[in-house]
Amino acid sequence: MGASQTHSAYKYQDLMTKTGFSLEQIKNLHYRFRQLSENNETLSRENLENIKDLADNPIKKQIVEAFFDKRNQHQNEMGSFEEIGFEQFVMVMSHFRPPTPKMTEEEKLAMRKDKLHFLFNMHDSDNDGKITLEEYRKVVEELLSMSGDIEKDTARGIADAAMLEVASTNVPNMGPDDYYEGITFEHFEQMFKEVEMESRMHVRFLDVDTRTIHS
Amino acid sequence: MPSRTGSHSPTGFGRGLPERGLLLLAVLVLLEGSVLPLGAASSPDISHQANSDSHKKADGGHNITKKAFPVLSLDYQHIHIPFEISLWVLLASLMKLGFHMIPRLSSIVPESCLLIVVGLLVGGLIKLAGEKVPPVLNTQLFFLILLPPIILDAGYFLPIRPFMENLGTILMFAVVGTLWNAFFIGGLLYAVTQIQPANPSDLHSLELLPCLLFGAIISAVDPVAVLAVFEEIHINELLHILVFGESLLNDAVTVVLYHLFEEFSSEGTVTVMDGFLGLISFLVVALGGVLVGAIYGILAAFTSRFTSHMRVIEPLFVFVYSYMAYLSSELFHLSGIMALIACGAVMRPYVEANISHKSHTTIKYFLKMWSSVSETLIFIFLGVVTVDGPHSWNWTFVVVTVILCLVARVIGVIGLTFVINKFRIVKLTTKDQFIIAYGGLRGAIAFSLGFLLEKNHFPKREMFLTAIITVIFFTVFVQGMTIKPLVELLAVKKKQEAKRSINEEIHTQFLDHLLTGIEDICGHYGHHHWKDKLNRFNKKYVKKCLIAGERSKEPQLIAFYHKMEMKQAIELVESGGGAKLPSSMPSTVSMQNIQPKKPPPAKSADRTLLQIPKGREEEIRKILRSNLQRTRQRLHSYNRHTLVADPYEDGFSDIIKKRRLMELEKKIKEMSNYLTVPAAASDSPTMHRARLSSGRDTDFKPAQQQKGNKSCPDPQSYGVKPATDNVPTIQVDLASPQSPDSVNVMDEFGRGDQEEDQGLMMKPPSGHKKPGEAEGAREQQKLTRCLSDPGPGGDEDEDEPFLP
């Protein structure tokens, strides 16, 4: 018992430095992880998909997929896992930390880039480094998927309009024969240049030890 | 409000001196003319005399002959009240006009200051004429007539999302900040008046409770003044909503404190119980006001569901329900301002989904107009009553008040921000704090509240009034005038003029869902979760009740998209389809750049509402043909769609060529509309509408993605209908082969060839409307709702989705 405790203590330290969470937050997340994975060591897609509250979420699949996406693990790998361990779980969660007041400008920029990458990876499902029209269309379709019978064309129309806008703002001087292949990460960043992503994209992680959470 | 008239200054300048001189002359004449009747109103004996004179004459003549029929008679009494009112309103409006004709003045001095000065002048003139100044800022007029339009305007167009996001901060400032101000100022004033016991002055008779009451009156930040000044400085949204939100919400605190202290100052003692009751009273006042407003808002939304046959009175419902909300809450001494805000904010998303476009414009314009006139009148009246008095100037009291107001505000803001920043993600910087503190302007509400005080309970009433006026003048003049240069100096972030784009909308929604999902995975119910729940509740139950017809099921993204489309279409028609594109779109320039660089004839082809003479068409075709080879390759790389038949390999080259030709031609002729309105379902309504409004046959097809550079589907719009002529069914469109509104391009071009210079006629898709049937009903609705109305350009305020 003592050995495993110290072992997890070391693991927690490691995670803390890697992700920036506090010890309490990591403990809470671990508790939650164990809840979700039914006390297994690894979490599978089914575990996440079975969360009741997620059922109404139109982009549930993308969210679950993001957890299993290797690109979000900051290790320059591609592809996806079958199952993830607690480390990967926390790694993904760390994308949603708010900026701390002590961060320097570069750290804030890095965090911002990080979060935008996360978003980008969610859209760019085929890992080719750009969001093509097809992928963007899929995004819009998913967004509208829970809103009743939406005709495909409407979703398509919206996605096309959005794509056109991105293209026209980023590459305004395309000749008649140029082809805009897809939204690259730079263009994607451009879309959000006025949004303070580091603050927008955050979830409040519990600091205190609450064991009242339920699945 | 002033923002709209801001554009007048350059043109006014260009209009030259004679007009300006005439206008000023007219104003002066009016002033003179208004002074006399206004004075005459309060001295009825003049008209009496006139009457009695004419009577006498009539009597005198009676003995001799029958009295002469009075050809011309003067009866001012008959109309004097409406006449005066109209004169005042006219004066206010002319002043507003006049200020913007003097080009540099309006940029240095905020309008509110100028208006107060005018008020001072008018008041002075009236006094000089020896007449009594009409008591214009008495409570009836001010609270019931002048204030509501301003608040309703603010509430109806309140940007909900930033407001809700910062609600905690705003409440802190409004409640705790105002309380702190009131007690600090009141208490210290009392302390100051008690010093110097050896030198008994007037002030010693001042007791604690009146001081506290005075503190309560003077401590509230005034929404009218804040609006007036902040409108012109365009600071970023966060600061604007913080100060403005605070000024709105502190009304509840002011009401409670005011009544509390007023009650108790007549009794003389306050117990702890009273304090406790006061707290409860505050909750009742605030929440009660919001509840009353929400109820009326829902009523208004519900009513608007049935107005499809009586579009003309739709705006009336909005106004009357809101006013009733205000009056009802004033009836119970609840916070009328919060009721108005709640009413406007609650009813807006539903009402806007139900009413016609014209009604929407009407509401917007009426609100802006009324609030503008109200605001102007308020400031003028402030000037007038200043001249009127009664004044009782006491150096100590006034100076100490002014200083204390400033000090209290600064300390309050700094202290509160320190606490608030612990809970905020986006911290408030020192610059922000400075602006918030500096933006705490006092205004007419404080004065009216002071005016309400009874003389017998408050012997020092006149001194209070004088002090209030001084503080108001100080904040409006000194702070109002200097805030703009300070904002520049401190390089405070300004408001971003970015138009809300479809990308933003998509990603806002995406982010919301994503964050909700992550919260769910984490397992704790954060505020995204509750927001999501509220949205779903809204969608499931509330919208069905309150929104008529099909619109109740429209998801937010699509509603937004259609709104933008409509705006585009209207702007398009407004601009007459001219080469000058609607300038409100940021990407206008880029679209033109993307337009292929063609010789002038082709450029004139860009004006799609014009008709292209046949010879030009030929030229264009020639040019296109030369580009054809490369476009074939483009098609290849772009070709990720399943082709029903792959003609390239099979070498149906001429058919391909012709098709490509027509596509390119079509693209050139398209209006470069930034928002693609593909010929899919969403396209037709816009087209129909546009056609309706433009009233012409030749239609424009809002620009499809230009030249297929974008990975946008030019094929989408050109899904050729199967089974026509001798054209093989080349389906490059991934959309369903029976794309509902797919246009028969071949036919079009064929006809275009034969017919005269009709340019491109975009016929509505005949036949084939399989999935489009459902759309048809919707289109009809949209058609009837969108009557061509060259109304105002888009207002960013309108783009705020409900509970985004």
Image: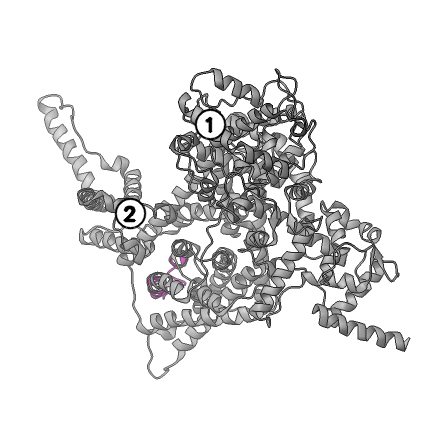
* Whole-percent x, y for residue A135 in the image: 67, 44
Looking at marks 1 and 2 on the same chain, the residue that comes earlier in the sequence is marked by 2
Within the magenta stretch, is there residue B462?
yes
Residue that carries the numbered disc 2 in the rendered image? B10
Callout 1 touching callout 2 (CB < 8 Å)? no
Q: Are marks 1 and 2 on the same chain?
A: yes
Within the magenta stretch, is there residue B282?
no
Amino acid beneath label 1 = Lys
In this view, the residue in front, B525 or B8, is: B8
Residue that carries the numbered disc 1 in the rendered image? B622
Q: Is residue B37 visible?
A: no
Q: Is residue B547 visible?
A: yes
* Whole-percent x, y for residue B283 in the image: 59, 57
Residue placed farthest to the left in the image? B64
Asked if residue B249 is positioned above or below residue B734 in the image, the reply reads below
* Disc number lying in front (1 or 2): 1
Image: magenta residue range: B447-473
In this view, the residue in front, B370 or B787, is: B787
In this view, the residue in front, A7 or B787, is: A7
Quarter occupied by residue B537? top right
Amino acid beneath label 2 = Pro
Quarter occupied by residue B120? bottom left
Quarter occupied by residue B734? top right
